[in-house]
Image (cartoon, helix red, strand yellow):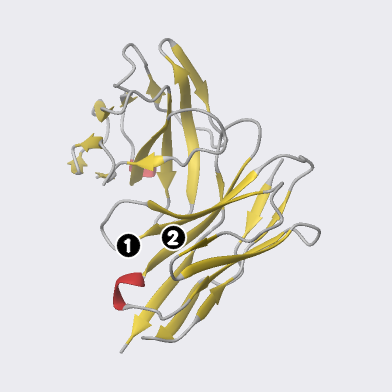
Amino acid sequence: AQTVTQSQPEMSVQEAETVTLSCTYDTSESNYYLFWYKQPPSRQMILVIRQEAYKQQNATENRFSVNFQKAAKSFSLKISDSQLGDTAMYFCAYTGTASKLTFGTGTRLQVTL
Amino acid sequence: EADIYQTPRYLVIGTGKKITLECSQTMGHDKMYWYQQDPGMELHLIHYSYGVNSTEKGDLSSESTVSRIRTEHFPLTLESARPSHTSQYLCASTPGGSHYEQYFGPGTRLTVT
């Protein structure tokens, strides 16, 4: 069975600074996808960024980028130029051939002035 | 935001009552999911469906049941609510393979007294 681990329950970052959220996973599959989802307070969960395992290049979406280390099974999210609107729960998630998401326990990110 | 809807958004109900949580999507997605989100925010898959008349139990055992009679509709039913069912329930859908993101509804926060 696949597992996803987020070892940082809470993090805080000042506005305009950079923060990195950690995620590790375990799988025996060779084809899979990794995601970071964001759940703002009292709002819907939305996709932040996606990474295909067969792609060596790290995914980027504006201020969000990942550091994907396949051999280490590590998938961290970097948020640059943090904004107050980035305050949310961030979930790392894995999906393989079964099209089912396995989530980590989440990291609560607080962006402060 | 995605076109996936959940009603009610909040529900407080007494022990022993039968309840149905509604989930609908207008995107024509074949795959739909129900997640239970703990107070600590961890998400667990409790049911999923890959199409009409197809339903499967997820990774977390649940006393709830689901049905999929129409593509756009995936209701979840609890025949006899108990305080242990108090949680947030999130519905999600995706158009196809593993590389697609899941689109999440706003959730139903259920409290059983």
Q: Quadrant of residue A65?
A: bottom right
Q: Mark 2, chain letter?
A: B
Relative depth, front residue between B58 and B11:
B58
**Position in image of residue B107 (x %, y %):** 29, 44
Say whether residue A67 is visible. Answer: yes
In this picture, is B111 found above or below B45? below
Tell me the number on the disc at residue B1: none
In this picture, is A81 found above or below B113? below
What secondary structure is marked by label 2?
loop
User: Residue drawn 34% across and 86% down?
Assistant: A112
In this picture, is B5 found above or below A103? above
Q: Which kind of residue does numbered mark 1 sit on?
A: Pro
**Position in image of residue A85 (x %, y %):** 30, 71
- Quadrant where the image shows the C terminus of chain B: top left
> Which mark is in front, 2 or 1?
1
Q: Quadrant of residue B12?
A: top left
Relative depth, front residue between B43 and A38:
A38
Q: Can you identify the residue that label 1 sits on? A: A40
User: Residue drawn 62% across and 30% down?
Assistant: A98
Q: Can you identify the residue that label 2 sits on? A: B40
Mark 1 closeness class: few <14, some 14–19, many ≥20 residues within 10 Å: some
User: Residue drawn 23% across and 29% down?
Assistant: B17
Q: Which kind of residue does numbered mark 2 sit on?
A: Gly
**Position in image of residue B67 (x %, y %):** 37, 17
Using the rendered image, report if marks 2 and 1 lie on a common chain: no
